[in-house]
């Protein structure tokens, strides 16, 4: 393999190409979860006992109750329209982790466990030019009506509100964010928030169109790229993504590497995100590690997570420890680099001695990092999800279009963040997540 980073990347691609291997608060639910057919909106005053209903049953996570499905209690309240059975989740262990602060004493983006959220992930679109198996059902998804999607001015306003309250990092996701026609001017407008304290603007992309847009995006203020790439074999790329596009992804990775290694470029980080699925790409783990020998890449292996419609099951799941076992067969001297872990990192850092780049493992399922979570998500249709796996949502879009002030939006967000569960959306781990209906990943935002 040649020493130059780009040639090194291309060499790995070439080798593999010819190889045969194969609710927090009740009063925050502004609209129904789109994946829960029986769900109905609760009134804004539900916190004081006013529920909308009609004999239906809903999961409600009270801010004062403990939250563990193993100690689920049922309460029936009279809504005026009929009786609503409310399941209240309780957990003594979760309650023990809570901060002693009251909501009135906490900062807007601080939850009841004392976690401050300074990282906002904004989904720009539900559209994507791939159909990755771990992200989207085989039959695809029904796109939300165009008029329900956040406009550019709405995105910029919400981003500004969060930056004013302490967000320092924004990542643009999707769907595929680069298919949004105004992606470059949008990045430029968000970059103006650096004057208010924003420090970083990143993007998560599949790379299919990135090479053409990269110079303009970097000029607009983009300083971090996470590129999703789950295989180095063209035929397998087609199988996993259900689309062609390997050569375009390869070209974008080469272009991003060149920009990253240019001392004059403002591009600071370049990461490859690889979702590991047993029986599909675990045989390529060591080949991905080899990419880091001559390139300043951070290759991150992500445990396969359950989302609605992605056919997750135990037989496809491969845990962090097992991934390491496979990698050590070829790279027995790979080392844990604890000093490279930053506060709130989702990835556990490793490095092969002498290699230029690094390897990381995002262990959301087997060894979660929920205790230091600092991330919030804004969906393309304007809802705040305080946890990737949580079912609770708060529609900022509805309030914004209803004429709400920044103070009202901040107050609603504050209550949503305060009601965040300690781990996994209160669902008790990967099997609880798999059993709970929610949006497909593409409609949440990666």
Image: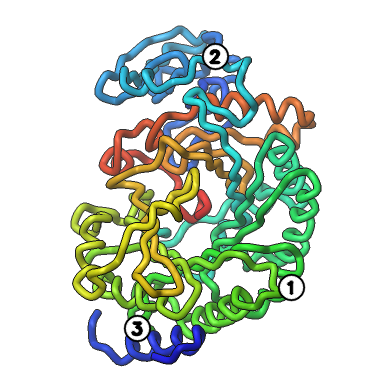
**Circle 1: element type:** helix
Give the Cα separation between the discs numbered 3 and 2. 53 Å
In front: label 1 or label 2: 1
Image-quadrant location for residue 110: top right
As rendered, which of 103 and 63 lies closer to the eye? 103
Relative horizontal placement of residue 56, taking residue 142 as reference (left or right): left
- Mark number displayed over residue 235: 3
Q: Which residue is mark 2?
A: 47
Closer to the N terminus: mark 3 or mark 2?
2
Relative horizontal placement of residue 66, taking residue 416 as reference (left or right): left
Q: Position of residue 81 (x, y in %)?
A: 50, 12
The quarter of the rendered structure image containing the N terminus is bottom left
Closer to the N terminus: mark 1 or mark 3?
1
Closer to the N terminus: mark 1 or mark 2?
2
Image-quadrant location for residue 395: top right
Q: Position of residue 7 (x, y in %)?
A: 48, 89
Seen at 69% across and 39% down, the residue is: 162
- Mark number displayed over residue 173: none
**Circle 3: element type:** helix
Q: Position of residue 122 (x, y in %)?
A: 61, 50
* Vertical order, 165 against 302 (above or below): above
Seen at 49% across and 85% down, the residue is: 247
* Vertical order, 178 against 20 (above or below): above
Q: Which residue is mark 1?
A: 216
Q: Can residue 80 be seen?
A: yes
């Amino acid at each position: 393999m040649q020493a130059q980073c780009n040639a090194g990347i291309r060499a790995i691609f070439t080798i593999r190409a010819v190889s045969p291997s194969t609710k927090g608060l009740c009063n925050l639910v502004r609209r129904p979860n789109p994946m829960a057919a029986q769900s109905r909106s609760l009134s804004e005053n539900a916190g004081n006992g006013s529920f909308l209903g009609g004999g239906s049953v809903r999961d409600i996570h009270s801010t004062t109750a403990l939250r563990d499905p193993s100690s689920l209690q049922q309460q029936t309240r009279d809504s005026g329209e009929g009786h609503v059975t409310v399941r209240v989740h309780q957990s003594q262990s979760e309650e023990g982790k809570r901060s002693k602060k009251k909501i009135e004493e906490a900062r807007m983006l601080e939850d009841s466990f004392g976690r401050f959220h300074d990282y906002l992930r904004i989904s720009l679109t539900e559209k994507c030019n791939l159909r990755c198996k771990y992200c989207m059902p085989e039959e695809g998804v029904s796109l939300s009506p165009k008029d329900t999607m956040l406009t550019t001015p709405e995105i910029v306003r919400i981003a500004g509100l969060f930056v004013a309250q302490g967000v320092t990092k924004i990542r643009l996701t999707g769907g595929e964010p680069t298919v949004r026609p105004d992606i470059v001017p949008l990045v430029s407008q968000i970059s103006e928030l650096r004057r208010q304290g924003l420090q970083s603007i990143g993007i998560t992309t599949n790379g299919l169109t990135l090479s053409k847009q990269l110079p303009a995006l970097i000029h607009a203020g983009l300083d971090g790229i996470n590129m999703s790439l789950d295989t180095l074999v063209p035929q397998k790329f087609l199988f996993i993504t259900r689309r062609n596009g390997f050569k375009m992804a390869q070209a974008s990775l080469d272009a991003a590497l060149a920009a990253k290694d240019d001392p004059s470029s403002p591009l600071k980080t370049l990461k490859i995100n690889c979702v590991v699925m047993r029986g599909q790409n675990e045989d390529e783990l060591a080949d991905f590690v080899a990419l880091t020998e001559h390139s300043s890449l951070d290759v991150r292996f992500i445990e396969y997570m359950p989302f609605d419609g992605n056919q997750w099951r135990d037989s496809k799941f491969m845990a962090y420890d097992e991934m390491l076992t496979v990698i050590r067969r070829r790279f027995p001297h790979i080392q844990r680099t604890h000093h490279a872990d930053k506060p709130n990192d989702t990835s556990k850092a490793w490095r092969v001695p002498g290699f230029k780049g690094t390897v990381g493992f995002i262990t959301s399922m087997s060894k979660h990092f929920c205790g230091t979570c600092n991330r919030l998500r804004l969906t393309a249709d304007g809802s705040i999800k305080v946890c990737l796996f949580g079912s609770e949502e708060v529609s900022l879009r509805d309030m914004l279009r209803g004429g709400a002030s920044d103070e009202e939006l901040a107050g609603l967000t504050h209550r949503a963040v305060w009601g965040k569960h300690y781990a996994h959306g209160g669902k008790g781990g990967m099997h609880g997540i798999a059993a709970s209906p929610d949006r497909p990943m593409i409609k949440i935002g990666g």
